[in-house]
Image (cartoon, grey):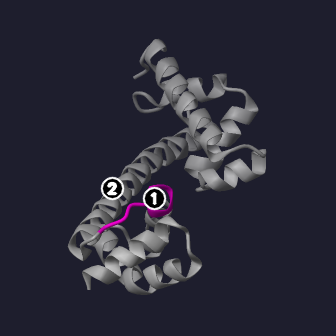
C-alpha cells in the first residue's frame, strides 16, 4: 500500500491527470469527512475540499507512507475548515451590522442603539463603489471570486480592498464620537 502512495504522490507532483483522478476517487470522501467533522456544513464542505485540492496542487510533496500522506491531507483539511469558519463568522458579523445600518437608513429611525450611528456615519463617508463592494460581499453574499470577475481584477486584489475597507471602517468608527 505504501508503494501505491509513493507512486501516487509523485504522479500528483508531476500533475498527471490520471493521478488526480485516482486521488479524487481515493480521497474525496476521506477529505469530505474530515472537513465536516470540523463543523463545516454539508453545502459548503465540497468547496472546502476543492480548496484542499488546490493546496495539494500548489504544494506537491512525495510521501513514502500512506499514514504520512493522510496526516498531511488531514492537516490541510483542518486548516481550510478553520479558515472557512473564520470567514463565515466575519461575514456574518458584518452582514448583521449592514442589516442594522440598512434598517436605520431606510426607515429613517432617529434613535439607534449605541454604535449604529457610528457605523452609519462611517459607511456614509465611503464612496459609492466602496459601499457597493462591501454590501455585495457581506450583505449580498457575493464571493470574492465573483467580485473579482465583475471588477476584472484578481481575487487577491479583492481580498486586499475588503481588508482595507474593513480597517477604514474601524478607524472611522473609532474616531467618531459614540452615540447613545
Q: Quadrant of residue 76?
A: bottom left
Nearer to us in this view, 119 or 163: 163
Q: CB of mark 2 within 8 Å of CB of mark 1?
A: yes
Please state the horizontal and vertical placement of residue 141, each as a whole percent of the image.
58, 56
Please state the horizontal and vertical placement of residue 161, each as a whole percent of the image.
61, 34
Q: Secondary structure at mark 2?
A: helix
Residue at image location 72% in from the left, 27% down from the top: 127
Residue at image location 57% in from the left, 44% down from the top: 103
Disc 1 crowd rating (10 Å Cα; few below 14, some 14-19, many 20+) is: some
Using the numbered discs, state the Cα–Cα distance from disc 2 to disc 1 in whole angstroms: 10 Å
Please state the horizontal and vertical placement of residue 74, each as a whole percent of the image.
28, 66
Q: Quadrant of residue 126?
A: top right
Please state the horizontal and vertical placement of residue 87, each as a whole percent of the image.
43, 50
Residue 106: in sight, yes or no?
no
Q: Is residue 152 left or right of residue 82?
A: right
User: Which marked residue is nearer to the observer: mark 2 or mark 1?
Assistant: 1
Q: Secondary structure at mark 1?
A: helix
Instruction: Give me the disc on residue 55.
Output: 1
Residue furthest to the left in view is: 67
Is 130 drawn above or below residue 121 in the view shown? below
Instruction: Give me the disc on residue 79.
Output: 2
Nearer to us in this view, 124 or 127: 127
Residue at image location 26% in from the left, 80% down from the top: 2
Quarter placement of the C terminus: top left
Q: Is residue 80 magenta?
A: no
Nearer to us in this view, 68 or 105: 68
Is 66 drawn above or below residue 137 in the view shown? below
Q: Which residues are magenta?
A: 55-63
Amino acid at each position: 500500500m505504501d508503494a501505491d502512495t509513493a507512486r501516487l504522490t509523485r504522479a500528483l507532483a508531476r500533475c498527471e491527470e490520471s493521478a488526480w483522478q485516482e486521488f479524487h476517487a481515493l480521497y474525496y470522501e476521506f477529505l469530505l469527512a474530515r472537513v465536516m467533522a470540523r463543523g463545516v456544513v454539508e453545502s459548503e464542505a465540497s468547496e472546502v475540499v476543492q480548496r484542499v485540492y488546490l493546496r495539494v496542487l500548489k504544494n506537491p510533496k512525495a510521501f513514502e507512507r500512506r499514514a504520512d500522506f493522510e496526516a498531511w491531507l488531514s492537516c490541510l483539511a483542518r486548516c481550510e475548515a478553520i479558515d472557512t469558519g473564520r470567514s463565515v463568522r466575519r461575514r456574518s458579523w458584518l452582514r448583521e451590522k449592514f442589516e442594522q445600518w440598512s434598517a436605520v437608513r431606510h426607515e429613517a429611525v432617529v434613535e439607534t442603539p449605541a454604535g449604529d450611528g457610528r457605523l452609519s456615519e462611517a459607511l456614509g463617508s465611503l464612496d459609492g463603489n466602496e459601499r457597493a463592494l462591501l454590501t455585495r460581499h457581506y450583505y449580498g453574499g457575493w464571493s470574492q471570486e465573483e467580485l473579482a470577475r465583475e471588477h476584472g481584477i484578481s481575487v487577491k486584489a479583492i481580498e486586499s480592498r475588503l481588508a482595507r475597507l474593513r480597517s477604514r471602517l474601524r478607524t472611522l468608527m473609532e474616531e467618531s464620537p459614540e452615540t447613545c
